[in-house]
Amino acid sequence: MLAVKDLEITFSEKNSIFKAVRKVSFSVQAGEILGIVGESGSGKSMTALALTGLLPPEAKVCGSMSFAGKTMHFEDNSQWQGLRGSKIGIVFQDPAACLNPLKTVGKQVAEPLILHKGLTPKEAEVETIRLFSALGIEPAVQRIHHYPHQLSGGQQQRVMLAAAIACKPMLLIADEPTTALDVTVQAQILRLLHEYVHNHSAALLLISHDLGVIAQLADEVLVMCGGTIVEKGSVYQIMQKPLHPYTKLLLASLPRLDAPLKLPLVANEGLTAEGGCVFAARCPHYRAICLEKEPPTKLLAEGRQTACHIL
Amino acid sequence: MAKLLKVKNVAYYYTAEGTRIRAVDGVSLSLPAGKALGLVGESGSGKSTLGKLIAGLLKPQRGCIYFAGERIEGKMLPSIQYVFQNSTAALNPRMRVKNLIEEGLIIQGKYRRQQRINRVLTALKAVGLPETLLYRFPHELSGGQKQRVAIARALIMDPRLLILDEPVSSLDVTAGARLLALLKSLRQEKHLAYILISHDLAVVRQVCDYVAVMYAGKIVERGKVEQIFSSPGHYYTKMLLSAHPSPDPKRRCLPKIIGEPVDPSHIPAGCRFHPRCPQATFACSHRPPAFFEITPGHLVACHRTQTQIF
């Protein structure tokens, strides 16, 4: 349903060039949940912004994506106007910053319905009330008249989700949707995301730094580091038999309820790997070649792929 | 064992927009020297307020706090240091790392310049930061480094108790793991006691000896780490544990969580958790439960646990 090809995002500042995302390609089927995991600065949020045409104007972007049978080039920003909010829904990390503080939450959810679906304000309000009660924003009839500051963080995120799914998008992008929330509220939001994908056969791009969240929801997982995909596979392959040292590091660093944390490795201080593997400077197994040459992406059995010289 | 810290029935209320908020409402706990206590609970449970009461940043309206045998309500001691949640906000953006770490010593006025510098270098080394960062500004540091500077700032006062408010919640998972390892080794080296405030049970699990679970301004369960994690007594603790996402896709479950974190301006009567409890009975909505010791040292405030045991 969605196929991204050779997405590349660069920022240039005076005489330095920073590649936020380098030649990233992936695809998602309908009804599938693709998890993108990585640390801050790995390019995962930039990828999400590119898919929604919301990158800052100073970003240079190349590549193309085919979505719902249409091929679109990232260079041309205008094509996203009609898609955002109707066919592509977005949920961001910080609902308090994303909701307009001067508008009632009901109006904000009704907006895409009026704009894209052509509903009258009255019809949109009825639909908003239906959405609110489906997502547990109760009592819905009163809640639509509230302003964002009157809601808790969890309720605000539900409102964001309501606005994102109002037009029943085929693709939902959730960028760290639960990072700012309590673990109990996180479980509730993840459940709602899962229900939406299940009931509407939509695709979900779930971006998170938390491997726990990814493991709970995703079918396929992309591991990103320094703007490249270092490993890709099914959630079972990635979580149970990680291949790339970076994936192993992420998994080993996650505090768990059932086992004490064994601290993996220290960074290799002072190493520079310009032009080499993005992870070489922190890799415990690096060799000379890792510092000089970018590792090619190797395709393995069962749709798995990884980019590492050592494997 | 002699207790380093004893908190007896403290309460702290404040008024916001005309409603009285009972942030901490009758909490008692104690902590031996050199041990670590994890305070867990959802946002609004009062865990940070309790931490600030112990650090003397707030003065309780009721109850006593003893530290090394002395009453300390509302007093800030050099031996109790607080490491704030958001290190970016806690570090003055116009001060360099050296001055940030040194500040407490200058205020104390006990040391000469050279002694202070030596102590800054020792503190910097203790938290695993290179000397090259000494004259940097906070904006030049990564999140993990800022958090370390905040800890060094606290360590330089030679504290006996460190209160850590969500030390890893703003860090990447890899930086968080390194910080947790640092906290573990620091505690052993310096025989420090910790109060670690976190909403993440897995973080508490890594560092702490004891756990206290807070809900709506009260402790609902406390005990040793093993007791709480292997046989949680309170439904709230069970809810928190079940909601923790496991990285094992085989153990996938999206638990059904009832209700939302409590609004501290509308605290329910009886057991404060009863509107969200799947097993609440008539008694739960009318009578607040008392603590009940299910195994030695493991206390639970729940009517149901009590009746099930007898």
Image (cartoon, rainbow, N blue to C red):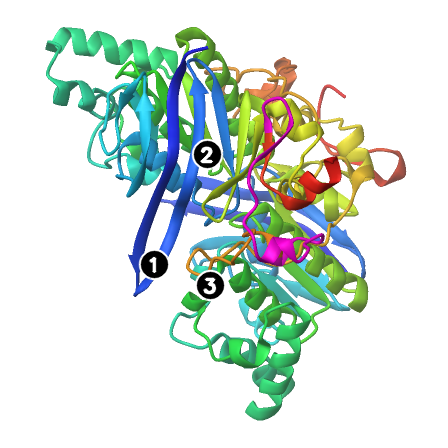
Residue ID for mark 1: B20
Give the total of numbered labels.
3
- Which residue corresponds to the image point at 61% horizontal and 58% vertical from the top-left? B275
Task: Report the mark closest to the observer, 2 or 3.
Answer: 2
SS label for mark 3: helix
Q: Position of residue A77 (x, y in %)?
A: 54, 67
Task: Report the mark closest to the observer, 1 or 3.
Answer: 1
Q: Quick check: is B63 in the magenta stretch?
A: no
Identify the chain of the residue marked 3, using the numbered disc in the image. A
**Position of A300 relative to A196 (above/below):** above
Q: Amino acid at mark 1?
A: Arg
SS label for mark 1: strand
Residue ID for mark 3: A98
Q: Amino acid at mark 3?
A: Cys
Q: Position of residue A269 (x, y in %)?
A: 47, 15
Q: Amino acid at mark 2?
A: Ile
Tell me the magenta residue range. B275-298
- 2 or 1: tag closer to the N-terminus: 1
Q: Which mark is residue B197?
A: 2
Identify the chain of the residue marked 1, using the numbered disc in the image. B
Q: Would residue B34 appear left or right of A251 to someone viewing this image?
A: left
Residue at the outermost front position: B310
- Which residue corresponds to the image point at 65% horizontal and 14% vertical from the top-left? A285
Mark 3, Cα crowd under 10 Å, few <14 / some 14-19 / many 20+, is: some
Q: Quadrant of the C terminus of chain B?
A: top right
Q: Quick check: is B284 in the magenta stretch?
A: yes
